[in-house]
Image: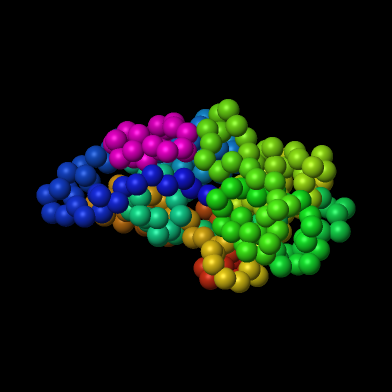
Amino acid sequence: MRLAISLIAALGLAGPAAAQVADLVDRTAFRVCADPANRPLSAEDGSGFENRIAELFAENLGLPLQYTWFPQVTGFVRQTLEAGKCDVVIGYAQGDELVLNTNHYYTSTHVIVVRKESDLADVDTLTDPRLKGRRLGVVAGSPPATHVARLGMMKDAEPYNLMTDRRVEDPAGDMLADLEAGKIDAALMWGPIGGPLVKQGHPGLVATPLLEEEGPPRLVFRITMGVRAGEDQWKRELNSQIRRNQDAIDAILRDAGVPILDDYGKGEKPAAG
């Protein structure tokens, strides 16, 4: 999921102070804050699906696209968005207090990834009794890890790092490699990471959305763009772009392999037209 770095103090800005914050938006370029090695979301070579969304917005705004690259570890927002080096984070969970959120432009969920020939290939809930005693790959501190612990399955789980510099570590890639090698029986991943990775490079695996889990924490999240607190005009401009280009955004996400859901997170979002 998106790493969180606090911007909560800025949420109280008003009047002239807010105007000063809004003045940080560069009107000569579409300046994006991004992780250079967070595939399949963002990558310095432009191959991530968030890169494609950024290209779409820059083109429609008639602006050149510029990036400020920084790993999504502690200090990401402070060193990029808050520092005024860039003006938007393309993917950010709705309701996170560290940025001002735009309207959401997609809804997704976590997935369970297994080998296609496995007897777990049709599992779609963590309460499935076939998962008992199986070695599950979980991202430490993630919502699925809490469900696994509540179900008493953490003793058999294999943890993978959440907060890491992906230029030197690749927890998602390691998890899928371990799954293919038989070191784990299933991998629990954020859908916009697991879905595209499976589609793009792991034909022997299948990713199934987890839509039936009961109790907190939720596994479904709405994804927005993040801007600085007080930049209401910039937020409205981006909301307008999201509204006008929703079909194109959906097409990018589907092409990448991202599981996109209806606004309530109950099922797959119908394709346009």
Q: Where residue 131 sits: x, y (%)?
A: 77, 60
| 151 left or right of 246 in image | right
Q: Is residue 164 magenta?
A: no
Residue segment shown in magenta: 61-86
Answer whether residue 25 is visible to the viewer in this image.
yes
Q: Where residue 42 sits: x, y (%)?
A: 53, 39
In the picture shown, does residue 187 fall above or below 82? Answer: below
Of residues 198 and 158, which is closer to you in this image? Answer: 158
What coloring was used for the rendering? Answer: rainbow
Q: Residue at x 42, y 38 (%)?
A: 74
Q: Quadrant of residue 239?
A: bottom left
In the picture shown, does residue 257 fall above or below 31? Answer: below
Q: Quadrant of residue 61?
A: top left
Main SS of the magenta segment?
loop
Answer whether residue 195 is visible to the viewer in this image.
no
Q: Where residue 134 sits: x, y (%)?
A: 79, 55
| 69 left or right of 166 in image | left
